Image (cartoon, rainbow, N blue to C red):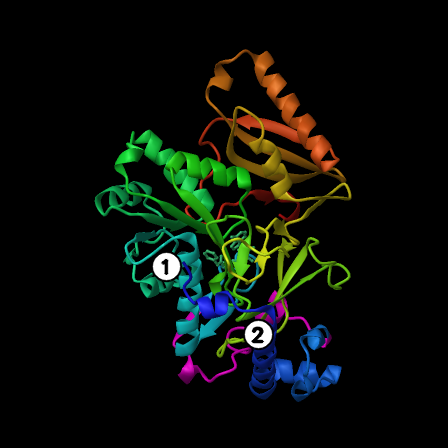
Amino acid sequence: MYWEQEYECMTRDDLQQLQLERLQSTLFRVATHVPFYRQKFKELGIDPDGFRSLDELRTLPFTTKQDLRDNYPYGLFAVPLRDIVRVHASSGTTGQATVVGYTANDIKRWSNMVARVLTAAGVTKDDVVQIAFGYGMFTGGFGLHYGAERVGASVIPISSGNTKRQIQIMQDFRTTALVCTPSYALLLADAMEEMHINLSALCLKFGLFGGEPWSEAMRAEIQNRLNIIATDNYGLSEVMGPGVAGECRERHGLHINEDHFLIEVINPETLEPVAPGEIGELVITTLTKEAFPVIRYRTRDLTRLIPEPCPCGRTLTRMERVLGRSDDMLIIKGVNVYPSQIEAVLFEIEGTKPHYQIVVERDGRLDKITVLVEVIESIFFDEMKKQRQLIDEIKRRLASELGIGVEVKLVEEKSLERSEGKAKRVIDKRKL
Ligand code: DLL
């Protein structure tokens, strides 16, 4: 089932022609209405009317989060405030928040793109969709809400938090699709277990998860524990919000809405494109945004494109699940370490729970990582020897995966802080 088959299944030639036309009009729009881009184009000698091929994209300047901050709050808007019908902002936990705006047309297109993602995951108008993303300045709640309404589903705008009430409503309102972060889905699963909820009495069929990185092992755990089909969806507020890309029922990579976004994957150090299929940083140019177009936005998200056609029939390219962020990368004793590598190892070890935290400290002049891992209760009843063995095994497997030694500390179930939104996996005390 497709939401907009004419776009989702376009031939590559038709798609590229459409992308070129839309890129030309986006360049004209930013050069005319956004002083930041007009200035940059002038400096680089770029003639926005002279674009004849998609390959020329590489001559355009990048846009970074810092550029958005420097132009806080409305400096990069391409329409007057009179034409803006919605404003969202990123949480801005580090530094200045970034603000994005939408025209009425932007909201319509956004809803359609989210509707595509929901439809690809299996949601129809017969579903009851519980949206446990935060409503407010975060794009998650409203973004998924409008898309689910567009599909015609019955939407429960419960927002995030209040876990017991989420479960009560899930039972009473016969929720069939759960929408939240993957870490919150696990928290809900834990709470259901504690409350002795009979899973077979629930009507849940689908879970659509996004907003933070997760792994294949975490998907397996969520699917098993909630007895649902769990799909991944991706987006970021700077280019729109959720709905940029989403998995179909194949669950092997996320189809990117390429008729609205032009995608590049670059080496974050050299800024050159990586070879096809290689891992790099995703760079996105919006093709249809009216209020807040961005040119070559550096997402900092690491992924790779999957060139093979998808059995679902969609021709939109797939990206692999986000492997981590280039700025989440920890450099420990000169070695690049990604939290996702640590997560993958932990998931393979029996007795550990999918909750962990990585603490980075500076011990004198040397960096030290300690991984706090929740383990099943029985481990603490075992003899000390068993605990030692488990710690040693985790250390050994992590050392061989990462190439550096790390400290490991076992902690009791539920002792690490849980998040109702995005999980915080890394605590870097070096910056404090
Ligand atoms: O998190 C938009 C969103 C909401 C997407 C709900 C999906 C569902 P921001 O708050 O701007 O927007 O954060 C964007 O979150 O650059 C990624 O690093 C991360 N992220 C989002 N979705 C995924 C995902 C929303 N499926 C940042 N997998 C992005 C991995 C994700 N990381």
Instruction: Determine the image quadrant of residue 226.
Output: top left
Query: Residue 57 vs residue 356: left or right?
Result: right
Q: Which mark is residue 135?
A: 1
Residue underneath mark 2 = 14
Q: Is residue 185 above or below residue 300?
A: above
User: How far separated are the C-alphas under marks 1 and 2?
Assistant: 37 Å
Tell me which residue sits at (53%, 55%) in the image: 254
Q: Which numbered disc, 1 or 2, marks the residue that appears first in the sequence?
A: 2
Tell whether label 2 touches label 1 (CB within 8 Å).
Answer: no
Residue 60 among magenta residues = yes
Looking at the picture, which amino acid does disc 2 mark? Asp
Residue segment shown in magenta: 59-87
Q: Is residue 119 above or below residue 51?
A: above
Looking at the picture, which amino acid does disc 1 mark? Tyr
339 or 427: which is nearer to us?
339
385 or 306: which is nearer to us?
306
Residue 207, position as x, y percentages in the image: 40, 47
Residue 278, position as x, y percentages in the image: 71, 54
